[in-house]
Amino acid sequence: MTLDSLKDGESALIIGFEAPLELKNRLLNFGFLKNKKIKKLNSSLKKATILVELENSCVILRANEAKVIKIERI
């Protein structure tokens, strides 16, 4: 399951990435690490962007970026 498949308000654990090295490094720099809890807060109307909460920070991801983050719903 990937991050983009969560509904607004749902939480999950990050279990991995299926991304090119450049995107993977960018996500790691934002703090998207394996076994971290993430919560999907909101999606734009056309689901082009996704607002997520990661620890005490909020990050906006493009939909194609969210599709490479593998999660496990909790």
Image: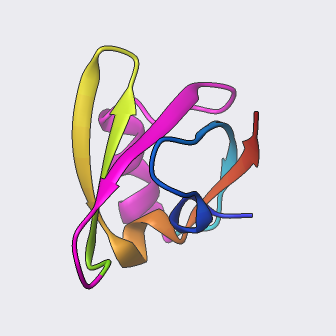
Say which residue appears at 22% left-offset and 70% top-offset. 44
Name, please, the residue furthest toward the top: 56
Is residue 3 found left or right of 70 in the rendered image? left
In the rendered image, which quarter contains the C terminus? top right
Magenta segment boundaries in residue numbering: 20-46
Magenta highlight on residue 16: no
Give coordinates of residue 26: x percent, y percent.
32, 50
Is residue 9 found left or right of 51 in the rendered image? right
Magenta highlight on residue 36: yes
Say which residue appears at 26% left-offset and 85% top-offset. 46
Looking at the image, which is closer to me, 74 or 16? 74
Give coordinates of residue 24: x percent, y percent.
46, 55
Q: Is residue 25 above or below residue 43?
A: above
Say which residue appears at 75% left-offset and 64% top-offset. 1
Q: In the rendered picture of this protein, how many numbered marks are placed on residues?
A: 0
Quarter of the rendering containing residue 14: top right
